[in-house]
Image (spheres, rainbow, N blue to C red):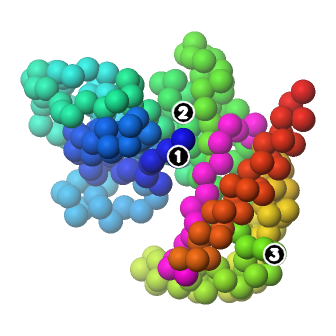
Amino acid sequence: RIRLSSAVSIISSDDPVRVFQQFATLDLISGGRAEIMAGRGSFIESFPLFGHDLNDYSDLFTEKLELLLAIRDAEHVTWSGAHRAALTGQGIYPRPVQDPLPVWIAVGGTPESAARAGLLGLPLALAIIGGLPERFAPFADIYRRALAHAGHDPATPFSINSHGFIAGDGQTAADLSFPPFKLVMDKIGRERGWPPMSRAQFDESRTLRGANFIGGPEEIVEKILFQHDIFRHQRLMLQFSVGTMAHADIMRSIELYGTRVAPAAREEIARRML
């Protein structure tokens, strides 16, 4: 039952044909468990690397998402656009087990992207990487209103994506995850002009209203329920972890998520939804 996906595939600077072929291959190997997280990306280094103009940032995503969906829906595709060579009926192979292959829209900061996902009837993956969860609450409303406006299923899946790490208790989780988290974020910060991350900032991100799901099982369950009250989402995807950690620690985090966090959160959400 484990799904296989990317955090986000930057289709604006990647090629939709290649992305589809890669995930179709993964879908075949896994027996129908792959899904694409398509997004514009919060970092822009790939655009000049592949010869794209940043002035075309929005148009690139719109056009390439259109092509990706066309490839998903038909074996032979006729398509033309401004930023990629045209397709004139060529067959796109391999074809996946799932029909259609799930395509999610990964959103990080723009309400317009949430509206786009809703109008297209595609599942939405909202990344809460920084800031207060309440700041992102309008995204859920925009998405659901767009679904309704376009006549799509109101139960189309909606996911919250974030960073996380679980240990036996909150202090242990913080002590284990902070050094690698800081190492990665400070490296990115040096490239982008951010100040170094402090332990106080990191600990603030672990609080109930912080962005990161880092703590003991009870803390993580509380945070899941808190955000579910805001978003009413159907799925939570956590990235374990930011930075390199001991394999045993990551495996323990996954074990705690599956055996203690997920069952408790599901049970309480089901009770509240009665």
Judge whether residue 74 can be spotted in this image: yes
Residue linked to disc 3: 169
Indicate which label's residue lies in the foreground, 3 or 2.
3
> Which amino acid, by three-letter code, is at mark 3?
Asp
Q: Are discs 3 and 2 less than 8 Å apart at CB? A: no
The percent position of residue 128, horizontal first and vertical second, equals: 64, 55
Residue at the spot x=48%, y=38% of the render?
Answer: 104
Query: Looking at this view, is 157 or 58 the one in front?
Result: 157
Quadrant assignment, res 176:
bottom right
Q: Is residue 238 magenta?
A: yes
Chain-order first, disc 1 or disc 2: 1
What is the distance, in whole Å, between disc 3 and disc 1 at their CAs?
A: 26 Å
Residue linked to disc 1: 2
> Which amino acid, by three-letter code, is at mark 2?
Pro
Indicate which label's residue lies in the foreground, 3 or 1.
1
Q: Secondary structure at mark 3?
A: loop
Q: Which residues are magenta?
A: 230-246
Horizontal side of 40 relative to 64 (left or right) equals right
Within 10 angstroms of label 3, few (less than 14), some, or many (20 or more) residues?
some
Residue linked to disc 2: 123
What is the distance, in whole Å, between disc 3 and disc 2 at their CAs?
A: 33 Å
Q: Are discs 1 and 2 less than 8 Å apart at CB? A: no
Within 10 angstroms of label 2, few (less than 14), some, or many (20 or more) residues?
many
